[in-house]
Image (cartoon, rainbow, N blue to C red):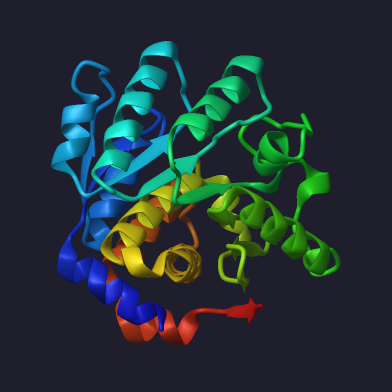
Amino acid sequence: MFGEILHRVRERKPHIHCITNYVTANDCANILLASGGSPIMADCPEESAEITALCDGLLLNTGTLNPDKLSAMRKSGRIANELHHPVVLDPVGAGASRFRTESIRLLLNEIRIDVIRGNLSEIKALFCHETKSHGVDAVSSDRITEENLPEMRNLIKAIASEQNTVFAVTGQIDVIADKHQAYCIRNGCSMMKSVTGSGCQLSALTAAFITANPERIPESAAAAVCMMGVSGEIAQEHLAPYEGNASFRNRIIDAVYRMDAETLDRKADYQIFR
């Protein structure tokens, strides 16, 4: 099922305008290229809307937010909506500061978002009026575990229904939900936490996947999450004894580049709850 979605990404080669953070921009660009997509990284407000109009999809990532970048996001988001281009929002660090949280809420109010991809702490800060934050990482009490999965799955599904969009909430167990159903995904490995920007890369992948498959947005978001998790597993399996997180980062991108539909479908570990 997910393999067909990946095949469509390779076939359609979606151009994704990424207004992302400077910590991970290069990795996001490379993982898009590895998946079959094509990245453009431009965050100047004077050109952002024009660049968005040239592309097929838009990624908004608030990791290194500033007023100019916020202005570019607002302009790009509006033109993406006018052109019916899919939009992914990665609300990095929501709840960490007033400026960041209020800016993300402004984007949510002004722009139609197709997928919101974040950790549970970020989602709660925006939609449950909780302000716990640990920088860009989820706090320990917001980890999705086997024990709290039913409760967290229902919470995320309820927020998705209320906001009328798709949420991809990632952690130890990933939950991708809209108002109709939830995918619970168990791919990935603990070493992925040692790489700065694995979540940013996933958001870029998600933008490519939903842009190439706009009629299957929840399923495509779930496919992107599985793809990232499976790639992490493969990357860890192929590390040499002397290699660490820097090599692991590169091997994730290599695994995405080498991924085929059969491997993704075979290794994808997920359940669907309706």
Residue 45 in the image: above or below residue 92: above
Find residue 211 and report its image quarter.
Answer: bottom left
Q: Is residue 213 left or right of residue 104?
A: left
Q: Is residue 72 left or right of residue 122?
A: left
- Residue 146 appears at what percent x and percent y? 80, 69
- Residue 183 appears at what percent x and percent y? 60, 71
- Residue 142 appears at what percent x and percent y? 78, 48
**In front of the other: 33 or 2:** 2
Q: Is residue 32 left or right of residue 114?
A: left
- Residue 26 appears at what percent x and percent y? 30, 38
| Residue lying at 27% horizontally and 63% vertically, measured from the top left | 212
Please, which residue is most extreme toward the top here?
67
**In front of the other: 160 or 6:** 160
Query: Can see residue 236?
Result: no
Query: Can see residue 204?
Result: yes
**In front of the other: 240 or 33:** 33
Residue 152 in the image: above or below residue 234: above
Where does the C terminus fall, quadrant-wise?
Answer: bottom right
Residue 161 in the image: above or below residue 41: below
Residue 225 in the image: above or below residue 3: above
Find residue 122 and report its image quarter.
Answer: top right
Q: Is residue 251 left or right of residue 120?
A: left
Counting labels gives 0
Where does the N terminus fall, quadrant-wise?
Answer: bottom left
| Residue lying at 76% horizontally and 53% vertically, measured from the top left | 143
| Residue lying at 34% horizontally and 44% vertically, measured from the top left | 28
| Residue lying at 24% horizontally and 72% vertically, measured from the top left | 8
